[in-house]
Amino acid sequence: MITFERVSKRYAEGRDALSEVSFEIRPDELVFLTGHSGAGKSTLLRLIMLMERPTRGRVTVDGRDLARVGRRGIPRHRRDIGVVFQNHQLLMDRNVFHNVALPLVIAGHDHREIGRRVRAALDKVGLLPRERALPVSLSSGEQQRVGIARAVVGRPRILLADEPTGNLDPALSAEIMQLFEAFSRVGVTVLIASHDLTLISRLHHRILTLREGRLVGSGGP
């Protein structure tokens, strides 16, 4: 589903964010990506989303060589990818329903289809009763669940998460990880960047470890 072949990324100032990184993530697999701050985790995720392009090497997503995806093809590529951020990035003046519906509205879906998909996504994350609530009235864990619902409402084949539990306590973090595991079980490929080694080591999934832009570990079950 996701393959990196000797991928490097050098920024204009001469800093190497990634160096000769190679790995493969299978369809339906849940994989953790870890490493110190500045190790290259966010850069790796941005390459998958085509927010950036590698300096060298090849990135393949769902059989598609991303080097062959032009600017016009980027929106279509991203429709297959859901993204969860650490800080939720919710619209505070819109209720939960409208926050989750936003990707479908942008994509031009019919309002009946939007309603059906949004409520199904909220039900999966346990927030259907709060669909009319404003984000400010929700706990941090609930806000993150809204972010997850928004990421999966378009039925992506791949789900990326960048430090999704960074602002949560251990109990809430475990609940959020259980949601990601549930999506993996129904056929979604999940890649989660996290520095919480204590939590992810208990979940028994493969861990990719970056150190100064290099892949130094790919352990797991």
Image (spheres, rainbow, N blue to C red):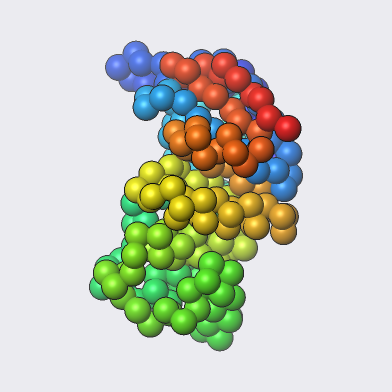
- The relative height of residue 73 versus residue 130 in the rendered view (above or below) is above
User: x and y percent of residue 70 in the render?
Assistant: 54, 41
Closest to the observer: 37 or 152?
Answer: 37
- The relative height of residue 217 versus residue 160 in the rendered view (above or below) is above
Left or right: 2 as drawn, with respect to 147: right
| Quarter placement of the N terminus | top right
Closest to the observer: 180 or 2?
Answer: 180
Left or right: 61 as drawn, with respect to 170: right
- The relative height of residue 141 versus residue 120 in the rendered view (above or below) is above
Q: Residue at x 31, y 66 (%)?
A: 91
Q: Residue at x 33, y 69 (%)?
A: 138
User: x and y percent of residue 219 in the render?
Assistant: 66, 25
User: x and y percent of residue 43 in the render?
Assistant: 44, 31
Confirm whether residue 128 shows in the render: yes
Quadrant for residue 60, please give it: top right
| Quarter placement of the C terminus | top right
Quadrant for residue 3, please give it: top right
Closest to the observer: 72 or 7?
Answer: 7
